[in-house]
Image: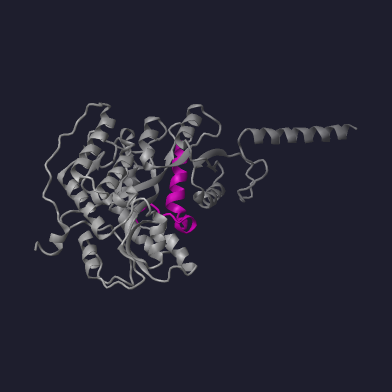
Amino acid sequence: MKNRLISVLLVVMLLAGLIWVASSGYTLGLDDNSGASLFAVGKTTINLWYNDDTLTDYLNEVTVKYNESQNTYRVEPELKDGVDYLETINSASVNNDDDMPDIYIISNDTLGKAALAGLSATVDDPDIFADNTVFPETAVDAVTYNGEVVAYPFYFETAALLYNTEYVEDLPATILDIIDFANNYNAPETVSSVFNWDVGDIFYNYYFVGDQINVGGQYGDNVDDIDIYNENAIKSLQVYQQLNQYFSIDTKDCGYSSVLSDFAAGKTVFTVATSDAVNSLSQYAADGTFTGNYGVLQLPDITDSLTTRGLSVTNCMVVNGYSKEQTEANSFIRYALLENSSDFFDRTGKPLAQSNVTYSDEHMNGFSDAYKDSRPISKMRAASDFWMLLENSFAEVWDGADPNETLRTLDQQTMVQITGDDSYTVEAIADPDKIDINAELTGGE
């Protein structure tokens, strides 16, 4: 009887110990395949939040590798709802919830808001940002706020020019080159439009004014560095408006998916697309919808003297300023991005925001070049409505509104939002000498 009581007591103690370990947030090292015993020292949990399900496979794989590589910490990824995502992060952090994120993934346009809320810690290894060996300047600018690098560039989205290689031999450098091509092109019956793009979405229009306007300076965070209304920006919109004469596109009926499917079907020679087009066209090729070949170029300038610049969004990994494990959080991010991201594109279809990446699909190289030449979306909370206002301005100009007055109104609306002064006014400037497309193409005749 005594031996039985001792056995029961030992079982009870063992169960109590297991319950304590489970409730304490530690693990027993059973999944690290390292030969550790059942009672090995537990691991401290690093919580990683994200809100894009396409990242799940990659994050699961890289966290398992990391957890197997050492015995002190384990990273647990958790997919969260994208609605009020940053607000949820803030609430969990301020309340010190058990599952608050030590690391989270957001797009760079929300970094300003995150930093102001204390949700982003300065990276602890600034040397990897000191030159462009690891990350291109665009990526570094995207994650810099108030003079500090507050996140790690992860992956990006930007636009580039796609062209059907079966229809094009000489590559266009400018919009005028594309128009000249259209004027002299003996199109086959399959081609319904030489140049077609989603004119209703600012992501595919922005480049027309991207090198002429400035919203927040180099890092997109300076409310004192705003330049929207100027002569070159007006000229750019004047040319944009004239394109409606050459490429009649209905802003209400021409969505991105239909534009891309038309390109795949050989109905379009040129289009503007984002990097997701690489996987989409690969799928079109697999099912026989797309039987041609295509190339990817940086977005064309308007003329030799009127340059363009695309827009980019950089998604990044952020170390939470409220985290008690910031050193290890930084270490994991570097492990994930710099040592274990070689198959990231193949798993997610997303391009890495790094300087020298080898892609299984060479078309992504063109988007990487476009990204390096792009302008990161700004981080200013005060100008959060700017992109919607700019998109509306492009739609109005396309439909015939005066480019000068439309741009002046946009500038005024933006400055009212930034200054909070409803009486803020922008003085009109005289119309610059208009770039007449027909005159340019005919040498002024």
Residue drawn where x is 47% and y is 45% of the image: 332
Quadrant for residue 276, please give it.
Answer: bottom left
Q: Residue at x 25, y 27 (%)?
A: 422
x, y percentage for residue 430?
11, 42
Residue 107, how many percent across, how many down? Answer: 40, 43
Considering only vertical position in the picture, is 88 above or below 295? above
Q: Nearer the viewer, residue 412 or 11?
A: 412
Where residue 88 appears, x then y in whole percent? 49, 33
Please tell me whether residue 105 belongs to the stretch shown in magenta. no
Indicate the position of residue 280 as horizontal and vertical percent values. Answer: 44, 60
Query: Is 244 rendered above or below residue 431?
Result: below
Q: Is residue 343 magenta?
A: yes
Q: Is residue 204 left or right of residue 41?
A: left
Over which residues does the magenta segment extend?
Answer: 326-355
Which residue is farthest left?
445
Whether residue 382 is visible, yes or no, is yes
Q: Is residue 324 visible?
A: no
Task: State the residue in front, 66 or 392.
Answer: 392
Q: How many marks?
A: 0
Secondary structure, magenta segment, majority class: helix
Residue name at image x 63 percent, y 46 percent: 36
Q: Quadrant of the N terminus?
A: top right
Quadrant housing residue 303: bottom left
Location of the C terminus by quadrant is bottom left
Q: Is residue 128 left or right of residue 44?
A: left
